[in-house]
Amino acid sequence: MAEHTTLMIFGASGDLTSRLLLPALGQLLITEPKRTVHLIGAGMDEWADDKWRDVVQTAFASADAEDAMSRVETEYHRADITAADDLKTLLAGREAPLALYFAVPPSVAAAACDAMATIDLPKGVVLALEKPFGVDEGSARALNERLALLVPESQVFRIDHFLGRSTTLNLLGVRFANRVLEPLWSATDIESVTITYDESLGLEGRAGYYDHAGAFVDMIQSHLLQVLAVFAMEEPATLDEVDFRAATTAVLRATSVWDDDPVSNSHRARYTAGSVEGREFPSYVDEPDVDPARNTETLGAATFEVRNARWAGVPIMLRSGKAIGNPSREIVVRFRPVRHVPRGLHGDAEGAVLRFSLGTAEISLELNVNGEADPFELERTTMSAELGPGALRAYAEVLSCILDADPVLAVRGDAAEECWRIVQPVLDAWKAGKVPLEEYVVGSDGPEDWPAAG
Ligand SMILES: NC(=O)C1=CN([C@@H]2O[C@H](COP(=O)(O)OP(=O)(O)OC[C@H]3O[C@@H](n4cnc5c(N)ncnc54)[C@H](OP(=O)(O)O)[C@@H]3O)[C@@H](O)[C@H]2O)C=CC1
Ligand SMILES: O=C1O[C@H](COP(=O)(O)O)[C@@H](O)[C@H](O)[C@H]1O
């Protein structure tokens, strides 16, 4: 662990910085009392150093981490990071361990990388880039090519905070450390998989970004494909960055839309006015700054196949939506039923169902058991357990890796390109109007005739 690191956040006044990054940094510092951070904020605003320190303090307080302020030296600079001169001044004399976090819109991050190509970067500097990484496969490749000219791949952190979620990381122990599960982890015994991340949240004032992205790019192209990759990977020799990222990237390289038919195997919808959890939302198209002509979906789903010897033939559905009434956030693994039950045993011998919650750290297994009243009548029972919630929230886990310059939880460059390749047929079919844009009422579970979430 690097005990003292300089973390420079571009986009100091932004939503990501105050709502997610700084509280996560506070939590990390509380959990790891030997860490100290030189925290430099940079952005377009003319802030005094004290203003930045106040922002940091407020964010730390929101994470019950005020005590960590004593281990943070703060400094703020007004800078346009797309301007080489500003960057040169910002970075002059800085030394590793140093991480630059691009908490800025993707177009600004890309322009800043262009500007960085014209100056000398401090040796060993880590570049942390937020999603979305590019807007399609070509732009992701171009950004990768640009980054490769700046620093080695091991110093590029393409952030996906779902890789830092304890609920995602729990997959590793549950699967690889249990002989009752690991041998069953393939198409031989698994019939289907569903990965759902629905939310009761609506647009939350993020139209400037979300109306261009939509549910599919916001959640499925990035986070849920990464969860799928962790779920389906071959056992890596170690959990270091080389083995772990090789294993997850191999899954993505093998993944395509089911049947290569995005029209039959994808769905999209957007919400209409209603209430959820006591909050009233207008129809999506009436939300401030939304352009109805963009036809942005707030709920998307598609079925994929991992075309390799382990998984071919298993439909894997990914789904994510906003303003959902009973938001399901889980991985559901449906096992195949037994081939035969002895004559005399009655009832439906459905396959077992294993559920990993992606919200709280829970796991459950639905099994067939002998009936309470009649031992020869099958009944269904559910065993459940709580898993360790993890000491760190997802962004703290990710920041810990950044400060230690360990890219294990960062998306590798070719994986970022693969994610666009996988979803492009769906995006093209939607753009061409081949898949209807349906509607669902805020607070409902989505259009009624959609395939079930789990
Ligand atoms: N917010 C979230 O919940 C999440 C965001 N992300 C990603 O994080 C990134 C940032 O998002 P978010 O914080 O919401 O966006 P915001 O619009 O809230 O913040 C963007 C920040 O970038 C600054 N900025 C813009 N242009 C420049 C420039 N040329 N030089 C220096 N600073 C600049 C802005 O300063 P000013 O306001 O003064 O222009 C602002 O501080 C995006 O890539 C987003 O996709 C990822 C996951 C979640
Ligand atoms: O990146 C994003 O993720 C959040 C969901 O993740 P969570 O950890 O905050 O639950 C999602 O609401 C947002 O739209 C998306 O940009």
Image (tube, rainbow, N blue to C red):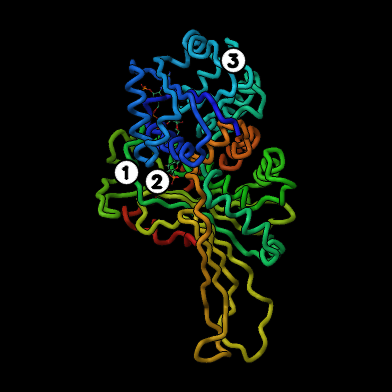
Q: Nearer the viewer, mark 2 or mark 3?
A: 3
- 361 lies above or below 300: below
**Label 2: how many residues lie within 10 Å, few (<14), some (14-19) or many (20+)?**
many
Q: CA distance from mark 2 to mark 1?
A: 8 Å
The answer as to whether callout 2 falls within 8 Å of ligand 2 is no
Which percent across, then down, holds residue 156?
61, 28
Residue at image coords 71%, 51%: 234
**Can you identify the residue that label 1 sits on?**
284
Q: CA distance from mark 2 to mark 3?
A: 40 Å
Q: Secondary structure at mark 2?
A: loop
Tags 2 and 1 touching, CB below 8 Å: yes
Q: Secondary structure at mark 3?
A: loop
Q: Secondary structure at mark 1?
A: helix
Which percent across, then down, holds residue 219?
48, 44
- 244 lies above or below 309: above
Question: Mark 2: which amino acid?
Answer: Thr
Question: Mark 1: which amino acid?
Answer: Tyr
Tags 2 and 3 touching, CB below 8 Å: no
User: What label does residue 298 carry, if any?
Assistant: 2
Residue 434 visible? The answer is: yes
Q: Earlier in the sequence, mark 2 or mark 1?
A: 1
Which percent across, then down, holds residue 21?
44, 34
Residue at image coords 45%, 59%: 450
> Which quadrant is home to the N terminus?
top right
**Can you identify the residue that label 3 sits on?**
121
Q: Earlier in the sequence, mark 1 or mark 3?
A: 3
